[in-house]
Amino acid sequence: MAFYGKSCEFCEKFFKPARHDARFCSDACKQKAYRRRIDPEVGSIHREKQRQTNIAITKQMTTKQVVCELCGREMTVGVNHTNLAYCSNACKQKAYRQRHRREGQGT
């Protein structure tokens, strides 16, 4: 029995197809070929710049500046975590100890 193989239409790597009508060696090559077919002008360098820009925009929209209640240091937190009151576990522990000392003296 002869070995039947094909060449990937995207990367031209030789592969053994699982189906008789397979055109690509992997899902990754299939996706890359689709993207190139949709917009052949867009290269990987342009996509990388666009990805970096999108990350920067997303970070600006999803972060907020808050101030630590104990030491007053500014910190950047995600908008879903704006209820954070302390900049570190050390400040959190120090505030806890101060609160409990005051409560112990009041009774």
Image (spheres, grey):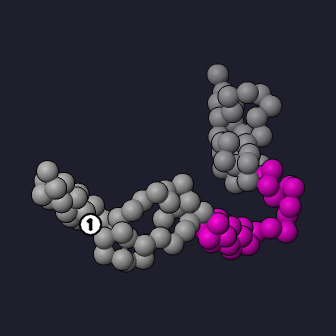
Residue 69 seen in the figure: yes
The one of 78 and 19 positioned closer to us in this rendering = 78
Residue depicted at 56% across the width and 60% down the height: 79
Can you say whether 64 is above or below 28 in the image? below
Q: Eyeballing the image, is 15 above or below 89? A: above
What's drawn in magenta, residue-wise?
33-61
Disc 1 crowd rating (10 Å Cα; few below 14, some 14-19, many 20+) is some
Q: Is residue 99 left or right of residue 54?
A: left
Amino acid type shown at disc 1: Cys
In terms of depth relative to the viewer, which is nearer, 55 or 67? 67
Vertical comparison of 101 with 44: above or below: above
Q: Determine whether the residue tagged by mark 1 lies in a helix, strand or loop.
A: helix
Give above or below for 81 relative to 14.
Answer: below
To which residue does mark 1 refer? Answer: 91
Instruction: Give the percent coordinates (x, y) of residue 50.
Output: 71, 70
Residue name at image x 73 percent, y 48 percent: 31
**Residue 4, percent across and down?**
69, 31
Work out which residue is located at the far front of the displayed protein and give it: 107
Along the line of sight, the residue nearer the viewer: 105 or 49: 105
Left/right placement of residue 35 relative to residue 90 reads: right
